[in-house]
Image (cartoon, rainbow, N blue to C red):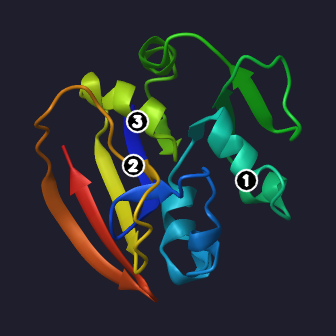
Amino acid sequence: MRIYFYGCVSMDGYLADKDHKIDWLLETGTTEETNYDAFYKRMDITVMGKRTFDDIADMDGIESFYGTTENYVFTHADSLSVKNFIPISGNVVERIKNMPQDKNIWIVGGNTILAELLDHDMIDEFYVQVAPVLLGDGIPLFTQKEGVKRFKLKEVHQFGPFAEMVFEK
């Protein structure tokens, strides 16, 4: 099992604005201007929180956008509005540890899930794209309890307006 984070932040490190919205990101660029397709082809499973799911659930073509992966959403709900997304609950670390060991898992958005996994040294690679936007306030990417975590810079790319850094454990 390898666990990946792939996502975009503002220059000041926010995943979403203070109202939990990602409009600023959608106004900055598109996935066609990134390496999203190549990254996604390597993934078997996606894991996200309910807020992230709510942000993407109304996107046109969402079912085909996440069509080749098993998609799990941490939520207290018994069902979700998009058919190929599966609600799960419980301890994030334990649920992910119990996923198939031969799979690549993408942690989609969500600093709450990411923080739990970082506190248990479970993230193998980060694909962090930085958009040329300053939000001033918002939802930060990193909120883990443990202070210092070190990673090795593996690659740096420019995709349209985005700078992408790839880090590994």
Classify residue 41 by image quadrant. Answer: bottom right
Instruction: Report the amino acid beneath label 1.
Output: Ile
Label at residue 114 = 3
Q: What's the distance in space between the residues labelled 2 and 3, CA to CA?
A: 11 Å
Q: Secondary structure at mark 2?
A: strand
Q: What's the distance in space between the residues labelled 2 and 1, CA to CA?
A: 18 Å
Categorize mark 1 by other alpha carbons within 10 Å: few (<14), some (14-19), many (20+). few
- Residue 40 screen position, x and y as percent: 55, 58
- Residue 86 screen position, x and y as percent: 75, 28
Q: Which-is-in-front pick, marks 2 and 1?
A: 2
Residue at 32% across / 65% down in the picture? Answer: 12
Q: What's the distance in space between the residues labelled 1 and 3, CA to CA?
A: 18 Å
Quadrant holding the N terminus: top left
Classify residue 89 by image quadrant. Answer: top right
Quadrant holding the C terminus: top left
Residue named by callout 1:
56
Residue named by callout 2:
140
Categorize mark 3 by other alpha carbons within 10 Å: few (<14), some (14-19), many (20+). many
